[in-house]
Image (tube, rainbow, N blue to C red):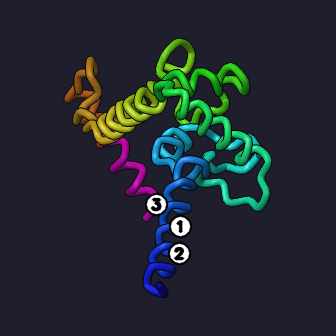
Amino acid sequence: MRQWRSSLVLFALVAAGLAQTGSTPLTNADVRRVGETLRCMCGCSYTVTSCNMLNCSGAEQARAMLLDLVQKDLSDDQIRAEFVKIHGRVVLTKPPSDGFNLVGWVMPFAAAAAGLAFVFWLIAHLYRRAPATPIGVAVDSDELKRYREQMEKDFSKLD
């Protein structure tokens, strides 16, 4: 009799645990997966799944709504679309890659490429060797000879 009672208590605990699995939002794997792609609207920088603020009204409502939508067998994209209808695109943790948001995905790479191109151009420009004689200027040996003679005269006067 005693063994039967312990088995009944154990069975009741297991049944309660299994029954609770679908009703608490964060115990549902689909809610956790989709919740990681949605931003908590309470003002923190966490996702719906990872918001750890005590009694966070934004996260609790979002989790309950997520659980309801998951139980209605909506796809992940349909669930995200429902949240976007309510909160706008700001609720998404990753901006979609269409329209003006495409600039947000492309510009960092374009800016890095332009910066590298400028650095290579600057290095090549600064380290370019200057020619020995200026281009287009011919050295006239007669002028050079007169210049040297004048320098010798001027230096001899200094002594």
* Residue sitting at the far left: 141
- Residue annotated with mark 2: 9
Labels 3, 2: front one: 2
User: What is the residue that sits farthest to the bottom in this orientation?
Assistant: 2
Check disc 3 and report its element: helix, strand or loop. helix
Give the residue at x 51% y 48%. Answer: 28
Q: Where residue 20 appears, x then y in whole percent? A: 57, 55
Residue positioned 61% across, 51% down in the render: 24
How much space separates mark 3 and mark 2, taking CA atoms? 118 Å
The amino acid at mark 3 is Leu
Q: Earlier in the sequence, mark 3 or mark 1?
A: 1
Neighbor class of circle 3 (other Cα within 10 Å; few <14, some 14-19, many 20+) is: few
- The secondary structure making up most of the magenta span is helix
Q: Which quadrant holds residue 92?
A: top right
Residue under label 3:
158
* Gap between marks 3 and 1 measured at Cα: 116 Å
The residues bearing labels 2 and 1 have C-alpha atoms spaced at a distance of: 5 Å
Q: Is residue 151 magenta?
A: yes
What residue span does the magenta drawing correspond to?
Answer: 149-159
Mark nearer the N terminus (3 vs 2): 2
Look at the numbered discs 2 and 1 and tell me whether their residues touch, using CB distance below 8 Å.
Answer: yes
Q: Which mark is residue 141?
A: none
Count numbered badges in the picture: 3
Amino acid type, mark 2: Val
Identify the residue under disc 1.
12
* Most foreground residue, 111 or 158: 111
- Is residue 139 left or right of 80 when viewed as pictured? left
Name which residue lies at 32% across and 36% down: 120
Mark 1 falls on what kind of element? helix
Q: Secondary structure at mark 2?
A: helix
